[in-house]
Image: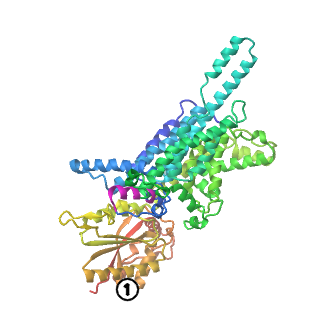
């Protein structure tokens, strides 16, 4: 590979530090975007519920009968910091009146930990570049400007932790490779000098120099093994990302005179032994957390094989069954390669795919001399990128976030091409008119950087705004709103919230005490549990006609309870504002209906891909939520504008209609009282 020389005082570093500062600022702003339910329901929702005793939703992965998610990493990474925060909150609340358990802190605090962890990726890029003598300035800028780092890496995904662990493992392996190559070269050089020496004094001197060389075969073995165990327990797909890296570590020096299969086998044996302490600790944490093992059993030493649970094994057992993974969505085998890589890395991902195709072409054309060696830096990066992609493509459920651990090797290998061009020199063996045209107009260093950098920065800005602030952005705002409503409502009022066409709302932001915790009355000593007063009904992408019937049934039940038991209630409906017109039509068509809806709040920005905004829709000013006042509705355009479809009034209302559809509307559902 050829890399463009960058001046020592490169302005890329200034831009890099600005983007690092932006990465931290975006945590505190905060990003309202909601990428996937797993960012809350596999981390914050569970830990906040356990630590604060809150009413939360425990997803099926944490079922104690068959747990597929380990708590070892979450315990060390989130539970202990949350415990410190809870301890600190007691003092700030008492002395300063500052509550550190609100929805904002619950959102921002874990992301602050994640953004700190994200800089492990930056550090790994810097250290690898310094080890191999590569220019690190532009690579760091490319990494920091990626929306993967600005959005995914700062959210509480297990994939984000996996990315940091993979980057750290990649640095350790690459450092061991270059260190071993150096030691092996020096050892072979001294052996040749030793054999060529004629005098005994010279032989002794060269022998002493050879024996003084440091050991390299088992460098960082314990650290690597521990890192791999932690990575697998965090997310078992780490096996696919770590396997090629560990293989390169085992393969160091093979084929030389000083490294044999004995060294290879010894490395495997010591690596397995080094992994045992971390493996035992992680299994113990999970076994105790899920109730398979108790401290009393440990004291009595009454322990059997059934007292232990290995969550990665359960994870693999679940995911190797295609019917199980198919329940979460079925995708074609090429989704990762042709959709997810361009979605995550845009032009950089396309460059990586084209580079792979070019190597396949050269291999088919018997141009073996132009291919990278298996034990080289390029070979390490290629295996770190494409081995996990190929393996993950065999699973029928494929999401873009599954691939973010390849970010660092992708940047290390291909980032300079954004600045130096797709091809620094003529890439074709035999020239032709078409090849010359492609090189001089698309691939050449004088052409491609002009559009590659623009595409890279533009795409990452757009995707940062979309996923960081727009996508499902109203869900957290709605949770924050209800957290305040829970505090100000009367104690005897039950809240019922129905949602449709949005992601699940994390209940950890509401701050409701758990109804599962067993309490003891200080007066009578009687045991009791709190009564549930907040009810959440999530109907996914249910058809609005069916949703109306669900609302009608729920209102009937609540009214019956209010009459029979005097149980007061408030019923709300939350849907994307793009569905408001359709919902309003359904309510209007039920002229004999006994329920009505009235808008309470609108949360902006919000976009549900399940309910995309319509270009030609009714303006919000015309959406009247009370059937008794239909005369106040207004269409998109006035009667005078019917002959002028491009009138100013109509165009402004049309634009306003589209903008207002990027929201989440909260309705109050009530019984229509006879006046």
> Which residue does the numbered mark 1 point to in the structure image?
593
Q: Is 89 positioned to the left or the right of 384 in the image?
A: left
Percent x, y of residue 305: 50, 56
In the foreground, 130 or 183 = 183
Q: Is residue 468 visible?
A: yes
Mark 1 secondary-structure assignment: loop
Magenta residues: mostly which secondary structure?
A: helix
Q: In the drawing, does residue 510 fall left or right of residue 618?
A: left
Query: Within the magenta stretch, is there residue 51?
Result: yes
**500 is higher (above) or lower (below) than 85:** below
Which percent across, then down, holds residue 218?
59, 35
Q: Is residue 146 visible?
A: no
Q: How many marks?
A: 1
User: Which residue is nearer to you in this view: 617 or 108?
Assistant: 108
In the image, residue 206 lies in the stretch drawn in magenta = no
Above or below for 20 versus 69: above
Q: Residue furthest left?
A: 523
The residue sitting at 47% across, 56% down in the picture is 304
Using the image as rendered, state which of residue 634 and residue 12 is in the foreground. Answer: 12
Residue at 29% across, 48% down: 87
Q: Residue furthest bottom?
A: 592
In front of the other: 600 or 481: 481
Q: Is residue 54 left or right of residue 144?
A: left
Q: Residue at x 42, y 48 (%)?
A: 77
Residue 146 x %, y %: 53, 47
Q: Which residues are magenta?
A: 41-54
Q: Residue at x 64, y 27 (%)?
A: 183
Question: Left of 522 or right of it: where is 240?
Answer: right
Residue 289 versus residue 446 in the image, above or below: below
């Amino acid at each position: 590979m050829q890399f463009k020389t960058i001046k020592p005082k490169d302005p890329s570093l200034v831009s890099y530090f600005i983007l690092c500062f932006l990465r931290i600022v975006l945590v505190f702003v905060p990003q309202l975007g909601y990428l996937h339910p797993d960012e809350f329901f596999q981390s914050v929702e569970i830990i906040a519920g356990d630590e604060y005793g809150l009413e939360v939703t425990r997803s099926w992965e944490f079922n104690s009968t068959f747990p597929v998610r380990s708590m070892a990493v979450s315990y060390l990474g989130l539970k202990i910091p949350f415990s410190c925060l809870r301890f600190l909150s007691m003092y700030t609340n008492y002395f300063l009146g500052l509550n550190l358990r609100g929805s904002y802190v619950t959102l921002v605090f874990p992301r602050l930990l994640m953004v700190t962890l994200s800089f492990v990726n930056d550090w790994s890029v810097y250290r690898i570049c310094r080890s191999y003598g590569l220019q690190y300035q532009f690579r760091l800028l490319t990494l920091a400007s990626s929306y993967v780092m600005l959005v995914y890496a700062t959210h509480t995904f297990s994939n984000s932790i996996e990315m940091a662990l993979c980057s750290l493992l990649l640095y350790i392996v690459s450092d061991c490779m270059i260190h071993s190559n150096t030691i092996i070269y020096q050892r072979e050089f001294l052996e040749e000098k030793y054999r060529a020496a004629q005098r005994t004094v010279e032989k002794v001197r060269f022998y002493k120099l050879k024996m003084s060389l440091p050991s390299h075969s088992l460098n960082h073995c314990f650290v690597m093994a521990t890192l791999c165990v932690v990575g697998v327990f965090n997310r078992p797909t780490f096996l696919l990302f770590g396997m090629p890296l560990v293989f390169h570590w085992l393969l160091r020096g093979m084929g030389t005179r000083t490294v044999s299969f004995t060294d290879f086998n010894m490395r495997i044996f010591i690596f397995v032994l080094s992994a045992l302490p971390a493996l035992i600790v992680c299994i113990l944490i999970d076994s105790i957390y899920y109730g398979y093992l108790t401290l009393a059993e440990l004291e009595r030493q009454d322990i059997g094989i059934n007292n232990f649970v290995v969550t990665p094994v359960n994870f693999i057992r679940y995911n190797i069954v295609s019917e199980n993974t198919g329940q979460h969505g079925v995708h074609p085998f090429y989704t990762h390669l042709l959709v997810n890589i361009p979605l995550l890395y845009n032009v950089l991902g396309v460059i990586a795919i084209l580079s792979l195709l070019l190597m396949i072409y050269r291999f088919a054309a018997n141009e073996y001399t132009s291919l990278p060696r298996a034990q080289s830096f390029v070979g390490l990066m290629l295996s770190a990128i494409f081995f996990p992609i190929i393996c993950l493509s065999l699973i029928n459920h494929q999401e873009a976030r599954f691939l973010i651990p390849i970010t660092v090797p992708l940047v290390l290998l291909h980032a300079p091409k954004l600045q130096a061009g797709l091809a620094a020199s003529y890439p074709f063996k035999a020239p032709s008119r078409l090849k010359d045209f492609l090189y001089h107009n698309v691939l050449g260093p004088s052409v491609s950087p002009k559009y590659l950098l623009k595409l890279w920065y533009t795409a990452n800005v757009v995707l940062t705004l979309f996923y960081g602030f727009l996508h499902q952005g109203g869900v957290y705002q709605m949770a924050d709103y209800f957290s305040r409503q829970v505090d100000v409502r009367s104690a005897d009022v039950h809240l019922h919230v129905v949602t449709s066409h949005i992601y699940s709302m994390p209940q950890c932001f509401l701050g409701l005490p758990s109804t599962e915790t067993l309490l003891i009355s200080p007066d009578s000593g009687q045991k009791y549990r709190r009564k549930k007063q907040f009810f959440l009904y999530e109907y996914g992408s249910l058809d609005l006609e069916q949703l109306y019937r669900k609302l009608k049934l729920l209102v009937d039940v609540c009214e019956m309870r209010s009459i029979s038991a005097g149980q007061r209630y408030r019923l709300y409906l939350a849907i994307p504002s793009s569905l408001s017109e359709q919902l309003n039509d359904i309510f209007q068509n039920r002229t004999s209906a006994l329920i009505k809806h009235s808008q309470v709040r609108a949360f902006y920005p919000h976009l549900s891909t399940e309910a995309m905004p319509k270009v030609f829709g009714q303006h919000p000013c015309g959406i009247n939520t009370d059937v008794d006042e239909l005369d106040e509705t207004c269409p998109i355009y006035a009667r005078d504008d019917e002959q002028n479809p491009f009138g100013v009034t109509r165009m402004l209302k049309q634009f306003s209609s589209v903008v207002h559809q990027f929201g989440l509307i909260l309705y109050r559902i009530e019984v229509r009282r006879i006046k």
